[in-house]
Image: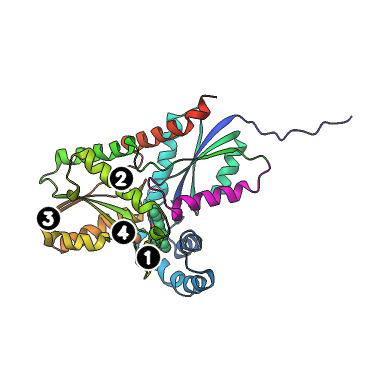
């Protein structure tokens, strides 16, 4: 008997939320770190040097020298009990708490570089019946190097699908009241117990090549706006809230001032007690736990600084989850109404 062609047996009608963070090595081997760095640094959204020249530098120098140093740095912050890096641990935790808060949604997480990869998670959400998908690049401030790169990877995979989900990309939340509020709550909680009170607050954001700003990347301006709104919400004068940029990579000029220079200069300018936040990172990672909370604090103290507290990223804290829940509420408002 003639069998009608089966409709693909996909349940449908569900809404998915996919959190996407940067990526991180799978383990502490040089091999894993090299693989992750190769994928990361081969992305033309991240390194904009002409391909043939960069290929020679990347394969000739960077991937032969950097992985060993990076392994040593990751080893200082690795979560051995959880067998993963802080970045993946906290992203997983955010995803799990979001899923608990939104039982009607399919919530998952992916990494732009490394595992779990975006393509496999998109397939899993499709198989779970999601025909609408909210992709959340986990960066409060938009940059082409991060957000646009996530979008590239998502749409590269969607290109392979016949039945694509309806896709929405979360708007960056650098100026959202819930985000500024979460940072204010964190600072107030610290000030309540800080003795002595900090002379200044330093907001350290991940850097970018200065050229990105000149070419129109809004990241620098988003960082400045976060800083201004936070200072206003705290009622602190603007010169007491400093904005600096960390994690410079390579010989080009990056966004200034550099965090490391500022940390070395502040004690000489009379700032002995400092509070540091890294509000550009949704989760703690190598760049916050090692570069700032370890190396940065050491730099400040070696220059004569007395107290330097580095607050954790919002991570899966109550304040952090409020930011994500608020963002999902706003993004899905249209979909849930239909
Ligand atoms: C080479 C250029 C880089 C650009 C541009 C860049 C932008 C950028 N990165 C983040 C967030 C993170 N970066 C992290 C690590 C990291 N970043 C670079 C380079 C660039 N980043 C490198 C080479 C590394 C690896 C560090 C090392 O091996 O020493 C991380 C931490 C990852 C982890 O596993 O913990 C984050 C997070 C943002 C937000 C950004 C642009 C705004
Ligand atoms: Fe980076
Ligand atoms: Fe770094």
Q: Quadrant of residue 210?
A: bottom left
Identify the secondary structure beneath mark 2: helix
Per the image, is 228 magenta?
no
Is residue 5 or residue 231 the one in the foreground? 231
Instruction: Check residue 182 in the rendering and tell me which mark sits there, or answer none.
Output: none
Res. 117 in view: no
Residue 7, x across and y down, in percent: 74, 33
Q: Give the residue at mark 1.
A: 249
Real-space Cα separation, disc 4 to disc 3, in angstroms: 20 Å
Cβ of mark 1 under 8 A from ligand 1: yes
Q: Give the residue at mark 2.
A: 226
Do the residues bearing badges 2 and 1 touch, measured as CB atoms within 8 Å?
Answer: no
Identify the secondary structure beneath mark 3: loop
Do the residues bearing badges 1 and 4 touch, measured as CB atoms within 8 Å?
Answer: no
Per the image, is 153 magenta?
yes
Q: Earlier in the sequence, mark 2 or mark 3?
A: 2
Identify the secondary structure beneath mark 4: strand
Label 1 packing within 10 angstroms: few (<14), some (14-19), many (20+) = few
Q: Give the residue at mark 3.
A: 272
Count the marks: how many?
Answer: 4
Residue 100, x across and y down, in percent: 44, 30
Q: Earlier in the sequence, mark 2 or mark 1?
A: 2
Numbered range of the magenta stretch: 139-162
Cβ of mark 4 under 8 A from ligand 3: yes
Q: Earlier in the sequence, mark 2 or mark 4?
A: 2
């Amino acid at each position: 008997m003639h069998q009608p062609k089966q409709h693909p047996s996909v349940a449908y009608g569900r809404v998915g939320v996919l959190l996407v963070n940067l990526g991180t090595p799978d383990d502490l081997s040089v091999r894993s770190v090299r693989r992750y760095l190769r994928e990361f640094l081969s992305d033309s959204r991240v390194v904009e040097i002409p391909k043939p020249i960069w290929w020679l530098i990347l394969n000739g120098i960077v991937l032969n020298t950097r992985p060993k140093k990076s392994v040593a740095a990751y080893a200082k912050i690795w979560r051995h009990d959880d067998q993963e890096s802080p970045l993946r641990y906290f992203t997983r935790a955010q995803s799990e708490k979001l899923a608990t808060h939104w039982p009607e949604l399919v919530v998952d997480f992916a990494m732009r570089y490394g595992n779990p990869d975006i393509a496999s998670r998109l397939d899993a959400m499709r198989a779970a019946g999601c025909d609408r998908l909210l992709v959340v690049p986990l960066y409060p401030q938009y940059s082409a190097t991060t957000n646009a790169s996530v979008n590239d990877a998502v749409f590269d995979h969607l290109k392979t699908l016949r039945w694509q989900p309806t896709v929405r990309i979360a708007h960056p939340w650098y100026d959202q009241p819930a985000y500024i509020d979460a940072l204010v709550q964190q600072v107030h909680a610290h000030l309540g117990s800080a003795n002595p009170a900090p002379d200044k607050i330093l907001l350290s954001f991940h850097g970018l090549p200065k050229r990105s700003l000149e070419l129109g990347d809004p990241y620098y301006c988003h960082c400045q706006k976060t800083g201004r709104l936070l200072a206003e919400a705290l009622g602190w004068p603007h010169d007491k809230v400093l904005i600096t940029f960390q994690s410079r990579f390579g010989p080009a000029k990056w966004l200034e001032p550099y965090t490391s220079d500022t940390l070395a200069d502040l004690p000489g300018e009379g700032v002995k007690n400092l509070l540091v936040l890294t509000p550009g990172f949704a989760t703690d990672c190598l760049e916050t736990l090692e570069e700032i909370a370890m190396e940065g604090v050491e730099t400040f103290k070696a220059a004569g600084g007395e107290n330097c507290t580095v607050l954790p990223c919002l991570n899966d804290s109550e304040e952090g989850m409020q930011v994500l829940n608020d963002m999902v509420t706003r993004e899905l408002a249209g979909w849930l109404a239909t």
